[in-house]
Amino acid sequence: FAASGSDFFSFPCLNNMAAAKRKQSDPEAAKFVTLSNGVKMPTILLGTWKSPPGKAAEALKVALEAGYRGIDCANDYGNEPEIGKTLKQLLESGKLKREDIFIQAKLWNSNHRKEHVRADLIATLEDLNISYVDSFVVHWPQACPATGTDALIRKAYTAPAEEKSMFPLAADGRYVSDNECHFVETWHAMEELYEEGLAKAIGLSNFNIAQIREVLDNVKKHKPMLLQNECHPYLQLKDLRDFCITHDIHLQAYSPLGSKDRPSARAGEPELMEDERIKAIGAKYHKTVAQVVLRWHMQRGVSACPKSVTPSRIKENFEIWDFELTPEDMAEFDRFNIGHRFLLWSQTAMHPDYPFKDDLPRDFVVPTALAIPKPK
């Protein structure tokens, strides 16, 4: 949210909290947030991670018909060309204006070197058939998997380093890691893209508080406008949220409904969508667990990117504007915060900038990479 007023004693954190409370009673206003640079961003964006080939395009069409006005993309998902083809058709038909959809993309880990950052975004713009993105975020703080020698684009699969895929492998089956590259260098290149107008807003993803502070301490001109991190009732990120509010950085949740279907799912993990306590809250409003959780995010001032390729669920995830959780409901959610992170991606933990080392066991050994097959 943008800070309002110019009084010396006007603090972004207080302004943001007040704005969030005002929006709760105004359904149309609640559908958007305003970033620190004045850019309006939808509160709910369609997530596309794990959207399989042939499904992402149709999901976008369904979402737009349901009222969505934002989509969260990334080149490592392998579906940007499919999404771009649909965007081109909709824009050329006149059914959609470019300014009516918020498109977010991400800088991949293999392209953190300052000389590779622009090439990463240009490839995304070409694949999406657009001239700018509304938001461009650094996907992870660590330059891993990465070789540091080439801009690695469009090959979203694991392969030996010499094949120059986006997931380069060393001889031992682990990711290649560019340990000499630091995210502050990357951020300076991101600022240049913002100055060029290729991105209307720039931000971070999967950064911890210390890493965000390091970026803030070293910006040349433009600080991050948003932070996208895993966030849900089991991982509420209260300290991180407060930090972002204080520094006028908008917090956006990926995997806002948990991430049961991810490739690296671990046995015995809690299942958020089956939580009987949240089902009980939903029953009071005749709403599903997903709808209640997304409403909880919104009332905390956190936007969200729920992913689905099922038409009924895509529509359901956007039907959260006709009810409001009570203060007692919101307080009940505090009891669900167990600090469970679904997405560790520990296969990249050999890099010094890996952000979640505190979540790893003391005797942790970096495992071999997850296999991502080459598309046929």
Image (cartoon, rainbow, N blue to C red):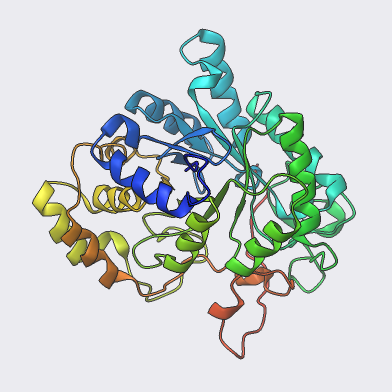
**Could you tell me residue 375's position as x and y percent?**
65, 44
Residue at the left extreme of this rendering: 284
Residue shown at the point (70%, 50%) measured from the top left: 108
Residue at 33%, 28% in the rendered image: 66
- View extreme (right): residue: 149
| Depth order, front residue of 230/224 | 224
Residue furthest toward the bottom?
363
Residue drawn 63% across the image and 64% down it: 370
Give x and y (percent) for residue 72. 52, 40
- Quadrant where the image shows the C terminus: top right
Residue 124 visible in the picture: yes
Left/right of residue 71 with respect to residue 167 in the rendered view: left
| Residue 23 occupies quadrant | top left
110 w.r.t. 369: above or below: above
Relative to 234, residue 248 above or below: above
In the image, is 213 to the left or to the right of 34? right
In the image, residue 35 lies at what x, y percent? 52, 40
Give whichever of 202, 76 is nearer the camera: 202
Q: Is residue 153 left or right of residue 375?
A: right
Q: Quadrant of residue 179?
A: bottom right
The answer to whether one can see residue 112 in this image is: no
Q: Nearer the viewer, residue 296 or 278?
A: 296
Residue furthest to the front = 8
Q: Which one is in front, 230 or 275?
A: 230
Across and down, in percent, residue 282 comes to 16, 53
